[in-house]
Amino acid sequence: MGYLKSIYLPLEDGRELKISVDFTKGGRSMGTGEMHASGYYVSVTPVLRENKDGYISESMNPFNGFRKHLLDAGRRSAKRAQTAIAIMEEQQKEIFDNYIEHYLPNERVM
């Protein structure tokens, strides 16, 4: 998945909350069977980043975090992408607080 932009916010346990914007054509989710609209989405996932031999690797547990629709779009465009990134940057505190309040207490550890 090619993210248009990602930001990382520190969590208290040493991990970081990765908040990313990407474009999806839409369709049925293979995981849940739900229909998703075409457009720009924000994905929020706790990750552990490690720097090994000059490379940064990210590890995460599946099904931790959430995804939120930001902006409808029938196709990718530079203007819509910049708008979606601006929305994500404006809402990053609210997204972080939402994760801490609603998702972190119910996190699955595998």
Image (tube, rainbow, N blue to C red):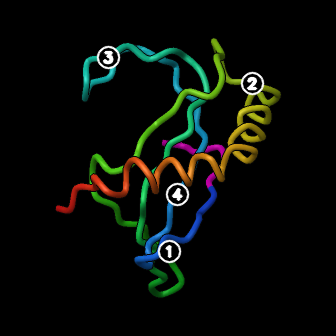
Instruction: Say whether residue 79 is left or right of residue 100.
Output: right
Measured in 3D between alpha carbons, the distance from the residue under mark 2 to the one under mark 1, in whole angstroms, is: 29 Å
- Local crowd size for mark 2, using a 10 Å CA cut-off: few (<14), some (14–19), many (≥20): few
Query: What residue type is disc 3 on?
Result: Glu
Q: Main secondary structure of the magenta part?
A: loop
Q: Which residues are magenta?
A: 1-6
Residue where numbered disc 1 is placed: 56
Quadrant of residue 48 within the rendered picture: bottom left
Residue where numbered disc 3 is placed: 34
- N-terminal of the two: label 2 or label 4? 4
Measured in 3D between alpha carbons, the distance from the residue under mark 1 to the one under mark 3, in whole angstroms, is: 33 Å
- Local crowd size for mark 4, using a 10 Å CA cut-off: few (<14), some (14–19), many (≥20): many
- N-terminal of the two: label 2 or label 1? 1
Query: What residue type is disc 2 on?
Result: Ser
Q: Secondary structure at mark 1?
A: strand
Measured in 3D between alpha carbons, the distance from the residue under mark 2 to the one under mark 4, in whole angstroms, is: 23 Å
Measured in 3D between alpha carbons, the distance from the residue under mark 4 to the one under mark 1, in whole angstroms, is: 14 Å
